[in-house]
Image (cartoon, helix red, strand yellow):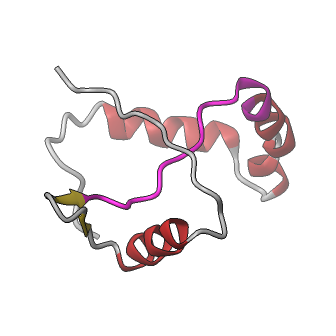
Amino acid sequence: MNAQPRDYKVSPDSETARLLKEAAASRAPIRVDTGETVYRVDAAETRKPYDPERMIQAIYATAGALKRAGVDAEQLERDIYDDRTQHRRSRPAE
């Protein structure tokens, strides 16, 4: 079972926030020494919680994008169907 992370708030202009931003930018974990123990912290950025209203707005904002780009919807559907019926184990090399 995966443990759920606990959230801690820090001021965006704090030394802790600055160190975490640097660690996230370098994509390397940091080690935090409390004097008693050294902790390894993965400073990878995580996404904000899912916002269904924002997702609905994004869907409406992009609706019709393929049509505006000149994509033939019927041909795209045939291509997808053909690809799915080939029973490949991996993607083809291109």
Q: Residue furthest front?
A: 35
| Image quadrant in which the C terminus is located | bottom left
What kind of secondary structure does the magenta stretch mostly adopt? loop
Give the percent coordinates (x, y) of residue 64: 83, 42
Q: Is residue 45 left or right of residue 41?
A: right
Label tally: 0
Q: Is residue 14 left or right of residue 44?
A: right
Give the percent coordinates (x, y) of residue 62: 80, 45
Q: Nearer the viewer, residue 2 or 14?
A: 14
At horizontal 54% and vertical 46% (from top left) the residue drawn is 47
| Image quadrant in which the N terminus is located | top left
Q: Quadrant of residue 4?
A: top left
Give the percent coordinates (x, y) of residue 75: 60, 43
At horizontal 19% and vertical 58% (from top left) the residue drawn is 39
Q: Quadrant of residue 81?
A: top left
Q: Nearer the viewer, residue 67 or 55?
A: 55
The span picked out in magenta is: 41-55
Give the percent coordinates (x, y) of residue 37: 14, 58
At horizontal 39% and vertical 59% (from top left) the residue drawn is 44
